[in-house]
Image: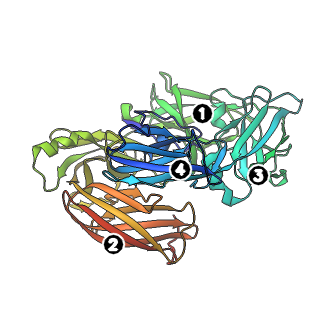
Amino acid sequence: MRLSIRFALLTAILLTCFGLVSAQENANKGGSITGRVSVANKGVAGVTVTISISGDALSGSGLTLSAKTDDEGRYRISNLRPGTYYVWPFVPTFVVAEATGMYPLGKSVSVLEDDVAENIDFTLTRGAVITGKVSDSNGRAVADERVRIITVQQKLQPLVNSTLNEVRTDDRGIYRAYGLPGGTYRVAVGDAQFAAFATISGRRFYTQTFHPDVTDEAKARVVELAEGGEANDVDITVARSLTGHSASGRFVDAGNGQPAPNISFGLTILSDKTQSRGYISLRSVATSTGAFQIDNLPPGTYAVSITDGASSGYFGSSESFVIRDADVSDIEVKVRRGATMSGNVIVEGIDDRTILAKLSRVQLQAFTYMSEGNSVGMISNSDIKADGTFQISSLRPGKLTISVNARDRTVTPDFVLLAIEHNGADKSQGFQIKEGENISGVRLVLGYGTGVIRGTVRIEGGPLPSGTYLDAAFIRPGSSLTIGHTRVDARGQFVFERVPPGNWELGVNAYLQGGAVSARQAIVTSNGVATEITVTLDVSAKHKPGP
């Protein structure tokens, strides 16, 4: 299975519900998360509080459970297996003080066996509102058009990112953006960077225009909002909608120059000749002569690339091209044979067939990314065969890294990746893949264990700024391969499950505005034992530059 990594703005979440847990049901089984939702210290009843496996809030996959707050604003979600969860209240008209800059707004929480994670509280303030109408230069309403709410104050960006769903005009051209923190804003329609996402499906597009009717952001009228306030008549007048242009060409075999038929392809949006800003997987296939055409493209820089490499065994991308005020033709996409990688998986220190049979529950994931050029990164998945062998096909040139994941995303993987070797060399930091290369004899060393690491982070050197992202990871001493990684939760706690016995180096990182601060500590784990560790993080220490 091969999936495209898309760098598009995520504007909605599909929640796949596998169950519903109430405050009364199974209250004494497994771990629990409890807390309170309040406004001005008064509990808010009837708020839906949802949890998912940490990281799945955005993907829409994995376990999702929810409960409603009672008359005092309290909630309890029970019967949770150990792990790290993401918790958030559904309160679209409010601002959550604990918002961290991702949607949905919430907190990361680590839950242990029979543990109750208490006081996972959310403090709400009434959100502000901006309303207005979008019309064209002839006074006609512009319906079903996306409206962008742009923060003037940078400090508001995390809150707005956490609260604001997509805002669109109705059939009268009227829009309403709500749940905003107090502050200053600019309002616009049209988005030069991402207009193609709409136009490819046949939608119209407009030149980026700010309230009231200017195309220069510096001349836009600023909207000021008090907490819980409302700004009305924030209208925008746009010029007529624009007409897009087509891009056409053909796919050819790079080896013999012959047409490559029936290729599935997509479109990369570029900020310049090489920097990707987004990717659109088109529901299009080249003709039997390799020809393709993409219509209604707005002005911008693009590249066409193969998306169905997993089934075809090929990869390829065009040179970048620019749409200005005319169609672009004769684009050539050279199709090349993908590389393959094969080898063996061993489990260190384990010969128990019952344990080895659990390898069928995990999946290898290879991520390939080109540091240059305009192709997007690609993920290839591979199962481990019963004899411990694996093969990953249709790999494109570039930097390749390997990870191990559970096939069932609601559980922790049974195994961790300890080492990657090839011809006696350490490949923990990845492989450089060449076109059509066949890499065999790769050795993946996995670890299996039943140990647990329970950690607490103690902050010194000053207060930790609200919303700071903290994570924890552990490695083997002397190795650079991350074996386990997780978020530190809202209580300053973290947990790693199914840790093999051994000596490890555990690190904690806080990502502050001036860079990251880190702390490292040695730890020894054993099967069947929960090892407690407290890591002291000095936030006044010298910051490491951000990436």
Residue type (three-letter) at the residue carrying disc 2: Gln
How would you rate the neighbour count of disc 3 (Cα within 10 Å): few for under 14, some for 14-19, many for 20 or more?
some
Q: Give the foreground label among 1 and 4.
A: 4
Q: Tag 4 or tag 1, which sits nearer the N-term? A: 4
Q: Give the foreground label among 3 and 1.
A: 3
Q: Which of the two residues, 497 or 198, is positioned nearer the viewer here?
A: 497
Image quarter of residue 257: top left
Residue type (three-letter) at the residue carrying disc 1: Asp
Q: CA distance from mark 1 to mark 4?
A: 61 Å
Q: State the SS at label 3.
A: strand
What's the residue at 16%, 38% (across, down)? 386
The residue most toward the top is 288
The image's mark for residue 521 is 2
Residues tagged 2 and 3 counted as in contact (Cβ below 8 A): no
Residue 451 percent coordinates (x, y) = 23, 57
Q: Which residue is mark 3?
A: 185
Residue type (three-letter) at the residue carrying disc 3: Tyr
Q: Image height check: is 399 above or below 144?
A: below
Q: Which residue is mark 1?
A: 330
Q: Would you say 195 lies left or right of 104 here?
A: right
Q: Give the foreground label among 4 and 3.
A: 4
Q: Which of the two residues, 122 or 279, is positioned nearer the viewer here?
A: 122
Q: Which residue is mark 4?
A: 36
Q: Tag 1 or tag 3, which sits nearer the N-term? A: 3
How would you rate the neighbour count of disc 4 (Cα within 10 Å): few for under 14, some for 14-19, many for 20 or more?
many
Residue type (three-letter) at the residue carrying disc 4: Arg
